[in-house]
Image (cartoon, coloured by chain):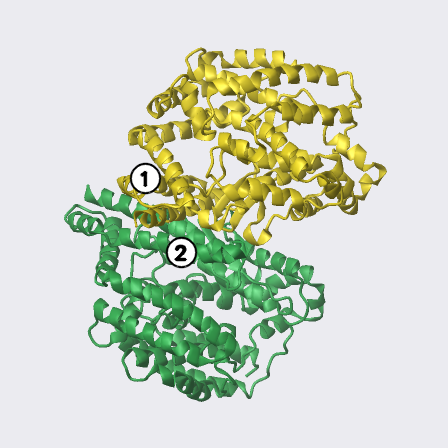
Chain colours: A green, B yellow
Amino acid sequence: MSIEKLKDRYLLISKYNTAAALLQWDFETHMPKKAADKRADVIGEISTKAFELSVSDEIGELIKEAEKENLNEIEKAIIKVGKKEYEKFKKIPPELFKEFNIETAKAQSSWEEAKNKNDFNIFKPHLEKVVELTKKMADYLSYKENRYDALLDLYEPGLTTAELKKIINPLKKFLVDYLKKLDNGKKPISIMKGYFPVEKQKELSLKALKLMKYDFDAGRMDISMHPFTTTIGFNDVRITTRYNENDLNDSLYSTIHEGGHALYEQGIPEEFYGLPIGDGASMAIHESQSRFWENIIGRSLEFWKYFYNDLIEIFPEFKEYTPEDIFKAVNLVERSFIRTEADEVTYNLHIMLRFEIEEALINDNIEVKDLPEIWNKKMKEYLGIIPENDSEGVLQDVHWAHGSFGYFPSYMLGNLYSAQFYYKMKKDIPDLNTKISHGNLHPALIWLRENIHSKGKIYEPVELVKIVTGESLNPEYFINYIENKYNMVYEL
Amino acid sequence: MSIEKLKDRYLLISKYNTAAALLQWDFETHMPKKAADKRADVIGEISTKAFELSVSDEIGELIKEAEKENLNEIEKAIIKVGKKEYEKFKKIPPELFKEFNIETAKAQSSWEEAKNKNDFNIFKPHLEKVVELTKKMADYLSYKENRYDALLDLYEPGLTTAELKKIINPLKKFLVDYLKKLDNGKKPISIMKGYFPVEKQKELSLKALKLMKYDFDAGRMDISMHPFTTTIGFNDVRITTRYNENDLNDSLYSTIHEGGHALYEQGIPEEFYGLPIGDGASMAIHESQSRFWENIIGRSLEFWKYFYNDLIEIFPEFKEYTPEDIFKAVNLVERSFIRTEADEVTYNLHIMLRFEIEEALINDNIEVKDLPEIWNKKMKEYLGIIPENDSEGVLQDVHWAHGSFGYFPSYMLGNLYSAQFYYKMKKDIPDLNTKISHGNLHPALIWLRENIHSKGKIYEPVELVKIVTGESLNPEYFINYIENKYNMVYEL
């Protein structure tokens, strides 16, 4: 049976992916510093090997033969997803891939330097090169209406730029207006700053992960500069966090966020492992899981009604506050410069700004040299503030240096999906919030496992959201969620 | 130039070796337990890939072409070592290799079970299979006089079984007699047992490693069940240790031992990295380094004269003892069953017993079924004691399950080399012991770097010991070292 041979082939590739993921994880968590130089080459070699195997003629042949066989539903999904990916990446000439990898590596170094020295000009020529190569890639990948569609499809399969714009427009209007409305509300007091020893923060983070039922026998938590989740292999989904001794939010919410990603990966069925369907449905669906746990659960009043006791056990200084105080404090809204530090209300505006810039760049409507100016103009328009320097502005994110154009919308879409899923979850579990306030988060996890995790990558996100919630992605759920929550936080 | 292409090819292989080494390190130190099953397959795949590349026709062709080129001394050494290894492994049919890997994996599981259940019969059929395959391997590898020569050469290139026996015979006689002599000496009091919290033991171990000048920017220390050293890549030489809360010797001397291996690897020149010469000269030379630091330095009176202050800073309870007391306590000699716990005097007897058994097995002079009986008979003869069960006897070591016949002598040879190197080192550095007693171990490291580490695998051990000490391996140095030291310890 070709389908069996094909599966074996995918499992072989997954072994190289395991090696590459572990090499990368180690690079960011444990590797001695002098080993960095040579390590990058090793990761490159092993990743390239995995990529070559995945676009080999052999895979193509096996897909073609297996298609003719009598397949069950799971197998049909393997072929559907596998074929789409194979055909997509097969279209890109290997030399272009190689050049892209070399240039993005250079761009990343120059971005680091530019950010440190606060000098966009250092990054500019490299970014121009990356944009040029990305456009070439998009042309090879092909698209109907908008060159950006080809890139968006890499991260959010099935979604077009036109559809995305239709989602963004009402949302942008709402957020800009609502932000102004909050100015008239009662701003929560900031109580999460102070001195919090790392060991105690770690204890708190681990308590949160245990409450979420993250499986520590199939994962672990380490420290890295930027928190991330990585699936090394089946039953091996690791997260990282970071500690800021002066800010309790940073590690706790990084941990819960990554824990959300990890629960998704830990919930993908064993029989999907290593196969094209053995992954999250998309970057945005993945982000919906992390944001669900981080924001919808972790920043809810119900969560703090329960978790308050864990908090004061470890940090008794919080006894002077109520669970409500903490709930409000962790939901402070601020017009700020840095996306990764943004709250739920402003976060999507940061994303819209990036999306609009990158979509225009890819379609030759603006030029790289004009980016700092455009960035600042949009910051003024959406958030009412202008960064003092490019390091806090256009240089803040690594994504463009990586050539990851089309990725940013995933963050926003994740927020929207999470609110829509939450609405349906509450319908299915009427006493969900009561349960959360008693520290019982399990019904939420079971619902996610059943409706989302167990489906792996079988469905494109557009289909999945319809299957799960009965309708297409609708930003109204997010808008309602924000209004309900922040009217409470700001006592409006 | 073919030599350049050949070097590139070796560097490519080294990348797969890095991946495999990291996967294995992670397996033993950090991996979540549920991931074990799938991980073994990944390690198998990546290691096999590295092996296939190393015996590929392409390597053979490049060696043949490069040999004709105008090479410098280093390049000649690369060819010499590379060619020997290529030809050796090329002789073994790939199917035999595969079968060997499968059967040794099975043998290892059965060994674990047999050891746990104290039942040699569980292991017996698997060991018989492994012995049969090992004999086939040896026949493919070829030899002149003794089938065991082919296996010995895998670990100690250039040494024959006949030569080894010539070394063993006088040494065995000395050790058996000397052990009886010690019975009339003054046995040191045991003071290294008690309660020692892990964190404090770790602090002590790290102090020892720092004193040795182990480079923590090019390595790290973790915990594993069995301590080991692994070279993940250039500037990435990691060690592991283990902690026994009731025994201070275990972690401290495991750490120093592995630190000795690691100093060797950290001292191999960068330009050798990834090439056939970028390795230790042999297993025994490697062991000479670990044993030098563990025993000759770490168990010396001079070391304790200095390290005593570090010890009592961390464990003040040792203030009631003198450095001399500790020196004696860490050199307690005991007739015991377990090789890995054996002292310097009895250790080599444990090895001789194993060597004699495996040499006889490989040459069909004894049968697997008779192993427990022969083991116990030899234990009685050499050490005067008989284990109560096979778990403490013939089943104690994993080596035979791995099919690592020919490896055991390395441990003994390492002890002998270390004493011979030490003799020469003292001649070259007359005030060596004074320096050690002041905590200055650096002259010893510099000497090892210059004479041994910097030479990588350019020379076979037989040549190396002549170059370094001016004569062939001579057990008299070890005999003198033992007599001098233990006459002092036992006040003879």
Amino acid residing under circle 2: Asp
Q: State the residue in front, B142 or B136.
A: B142
User: Which residue position holds label 1?
Assistant: B52
- Secondary element under disc 1, as helix, strand or loop, is helix
Q: Residue A140 placed where, x, y %?
A: 22, 68
Q: Residue B296 placed where, x, y %?
A: 67, 34
Indicate the quadrant where residue B241 lies.
top right
Q: Quadrant of the N terminus of chain A?
A: top left
**Label 1 Cα crowd, 10 Å radius (few <14 / some 14-19 / many 20+):** some
Q: Residue A377 placed where, x, y %?
A: 42, 88
Q: Quadrant of the C terminus of chain A?
A: bottom right
Indicate the quadrant where residue B367 lies.
top left
- Eyeballing the image, is B429 above or below A450? above
Q: Chain of mark 2?
A: A
- Secondary element under disc 2, as helix, strand or loop, is helix
User: Which residue position holds label 2?
Assistant: A41
Q: State the residue in front, A265 or B27.
A: B27
Indicate the quadrant where residue A141 lies.
bottom left
Q: Residue A262 placed where, x, y %?
A: 46, 56
